[in-house]
Image: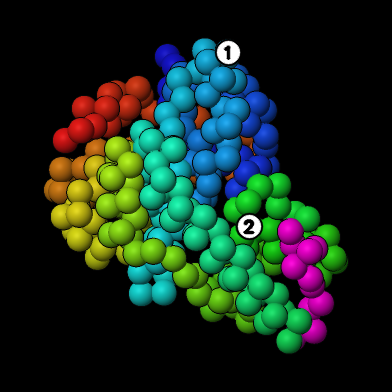
Amino acid sequence: MPNIDLHLHTLYSDGALEVEALLKLALSKNLSCVSITDHDTFDAYATAPEIAESLGVELISGIEISSVNNGRDVHILGYFCDIQNAELRATLEIQREKRKDRVRAIIEKLCGIGVSLSYKQVEEQCFGASISRPHIAFALMQAGYVNSFQEAFERYLKEGAIAYCPPKGISSEDAVFLIKKAGGLAVMAHPEYTNADELIPKLAECGIAGLEVYNYKTAKSVKKYKKIAEKYGLVATGGSDFHGGSGLIGMQNLPYSIVEELKARLGS
């Protein structure tokens, strides 16, 4: 039975695949409906709709907005947005500039501890306009400072690490309002990873439509967030948060009924 995956990334943010390769992989994994949710950019949608149509894959417009609450990343997914909405696009452009500022601040910290890295070296790892910490990790690997992506985050880039700099961006509530104004539905991404459960009631009041219950989670976690979704009347959505390789995409075997639930919320 065909399934769905509503959380995929391309080279336009921090994914490893070009749009066509990603959509062909999705088709090979028997996915009938997907959403490309790159960080703070719709660049993939310059070609994605036409490619998806040619492959017979339903494509839902998607975005992953990097919002900030109390100095912490809280990612909000937006589905069915008008990707030409002027206010949304202007905000995303500001978001991308803040990403660049954060990367520069991290590089400055790295240089301060003897890890010589330039912005250009990091930029060379970034295919699109949405630069981020993963691109720094790849640059560190290429420069020989670390042996793996994970080591880069553990030693330098994760929260609490020596070169970590907190994110800057719009609030989660503003992200929800922005998505709604663009005609879309907002969903809180990977709540287990975000670890900000106290924010869910507030986002429900703001009109969030769903909670990403099915992601790279344990059965215990799925049960927990499914219960929370039910409590606040949210659609239990899901996706692989796929960035590269082929192991995760579509592995949740999520039914199309989730998309039907989301579509029923449009305009409400």
State the residue in front, 201 or 46: 46
Instruction: Rate crowding at label 2 as few (under 14), some (14 to 19) or many (20 or more) other CA atoms within 10 Å.
Output: many
Q: Which quadrant is the N terminus positioned in?
A: top left
Residue where numbered disc 2 is placed: 131
For the residue marked with disc 1, what is the amino acid?
Answer: Ser
Vertical relation: 240 (above or below) 260: below
Vertical relation: 194 (above or below) 104: above
Q: Residue at x 44, y 38 (%)?
A: 84
Estimate the x, y position of residue 87 in percent, counting from the top left. 38, 50
Decide which of tag 1 and tag 2 comes sooner along the chain: 1
The magenta stretch spans which residues?
A: 113-123
Q: Is residue 225 visible?
A: no
State the residue in front, 41 or 247: 41
For the residue marked with disc 2, what is the amino acid?
Answer: Ile
Label 1 and label 2: CA atoms lie apart by: 30 Å
Instruction: Rate crowding at label 1 as few (under 14), some (14 to 19) or many (20 or more) other CA atoms within 10 Å.
Output: few
In the picture, residue 215 is in which quadrant? top left
Q: Residue at x 47, y 70 (%)?
A: 168
Magenta highlight on residue 50:
no
Residue where numbered disc 1 is placed: 54
User: Looking at the image, do the residues carrying marks 1 and 2 touch, with CB atoms under 8 Å apart?
Assistant: no
Estimate the x, y position of residue 239 in percent, counting from the top left. 44, 38
Q: Is residue 88 left or right of residue 138?
A: left
